[in-house]
Amino acid sequence: MMKTPQLMLMASLLMELGLLGMPLCNRRPDASPVESPAPADAGVPISASTPESPIPWPKQDLTPLATLEGPAIQAAHAALEEALKRFPKESTGQCAFSARSLEAVIGKEAGWYFVRINRRVDRCPGFGPGVTGLETDWFELFAVSPDGSIERYPYHP
């Protein structure tokens, strides 16, 4: 069973990536919390009974981007946080220096999670598809041990 801090980390990662509700970075200061509809029985789709809701609740089963175990999500979150720490402080708030411009590739070997963080600034407004404008082949590789400690691969991109 996940502990509260682990659950909060996973939820914040999913929110930052826009996979859980409204992304944190786009939240309006005056936004009030939105009540979620009552959960449906297993296998029964959620009906969008409130048409005024700003959330486009799925009418069918979700199409998963990926199905990951909790520790893999925690490893990816830790690696994303480490990569974000390396960005210049004066660039805070710019899309190219945020989690929105990053993607995580997660693997597991010998009980260790290996997370490669790829830079994808082409996902930011103002950059065309495939155009980075900043760097090419930028990535960082992290190893996350079974006990949760994280190490960055010793090179500088």
Image (spheres, rainbow, N blue to C red):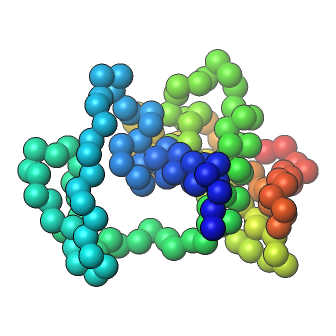
Q: How many marks?
A: 0
Q: Quadrant of the C terminus?
A: top right
Q: Residue at x 23, y 78 (%)?
A: 44
127 on left or right of 96: left
Quarter occupied by the N terminus? bottom right
- List x then y, in percent, for residue 123: 45, 46
The reply, left or right, for residue 70 in relation to residue 40 is right
Horizontal and vertical percent position of residue 146: 82, 67
Q: Residue at x 56, y 36 (%)?
A: 98
- Which quadrant holds residue 81? top right
| 33 lies left or right of 46 | right
Closest to the observer, 55 or 157: 55
Q: Which quadrant would residue 22 be assigned to in this image? A: top left
Q: Residue at x 80, y 58 (%)?
A: 148
- Relative height, residue 138 to residue 32 (above, below): below
Q: Position of residue 7 (x, y in %)?
A: 58, 54
Q: In the picture shown, does residue 91 fall above or below 140?
A: above
Q: Is residue 42 visible?
A: yes
What residue is drawn where x is 77% and y is 56%?
A: 141
State the image coordinates of residue 23 (x, y, percent, origin top left): 41, 41
Residue 54 vertical placement versus 61 (above, below): above
For residue 131, say whether it is visible: no
